[in-house]
Image (cartoon, helix red, strand yellow):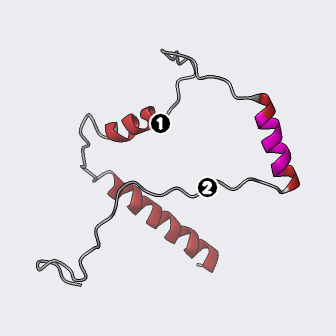
Amino acid sequence: MNRSTRNALSTAAVTATALALGGCATQHLSNDFGQAVRQSIAQQIANPDTKYVGAIAPGSNAARVAAAQDRYVKGRVIQPSAQVAATSVAAAPSSAPSGLSQ
């Protein structure tokens, strides 16, 4: 028996064994399997026919927009002013709580 025939028989035997063992799988999934994924996907799809209720946002000032675009193109963008936070943040403790290890 030559090598190619032996390889073909080996491949056929492995394939037949894999198919036979695949029929032994008895895992049954519940009826709602994958529902969480489908729900997450549905929540991320935008509705193209959305109707917004309420006042329409006012339009922008065309002259200001044109001036801002012109400054951007010419590299003379006005930097925003720094804002100071109205609240203060307490300092974090220097060591971990007693129940935690580092």
- Residue at numbered disc 2: 81
Image spot of residue 68 (x, y percent):
78, 43
Element class at badge 1: loop
Q: Which quarter of the image is occupied by the C terminus?
A: bottom left
Image point (35%, 56%), residue name = 87
| CA neighbours of label 1 inside 10 A, class few (<14), some (14 to 19), many (20+) | few
Q: Residue at x 43, y 59 (%)?
A: 16
Please determine whether, in this image, residue 23 is positioned above or below residue 17: above
Return the residue nearer the eye: 12 or 91. 91
Q: Residue furthest right?
A: 74
**Residue beneath disc 1:** 44
Q: Is residue 7 depicted above or below 45 in this figure?
A: below
Q: Nearer the viewer, residue 69 or 81?
A: 81
Q: Secondary structure at mark 2?
A: loop
Indicate the amino acid at tag 1. Answer: Gln
Q: Amino acid at mark 2?
A: Ser
Point out the frontmost of discs 2 and 1.
2
Magenta-tinted stretch: 64-72
Can residue 6 be found in the magenta stretch? no
Above or below, comparing residue 79 to residue 60 in the picture: below
- Number of other residues with Cα within 10 Å of mark 2, as a class: few under 14, some 14 to 19, many 20 or more: few
Residue 42 at x, y = what percent? 44, 32
Which sits earlier in the primary sequence, circle 2 or circle 1? 1
Q: Could you tell me which residue is drawn at 44 percent across and 37 percent down?
A: 41
Q: Position of residue 100 (x, y in %)?
A: 16, 78
Q: Residue 6: where, in percent of width, then height?
A: 56, 75
Magenta highlight: main SS:
helix
Mark 2–mark 1 distance (CA, rounded to whole Å): 36 Å
* Viewer-side residue, 5 vs 63: 63
Above or below, comparing residue 95 to residue 26 in the picture: below
Q: Is residue 49 left or right of residue 38?
A: right
44 sits to left or right of 97:
right
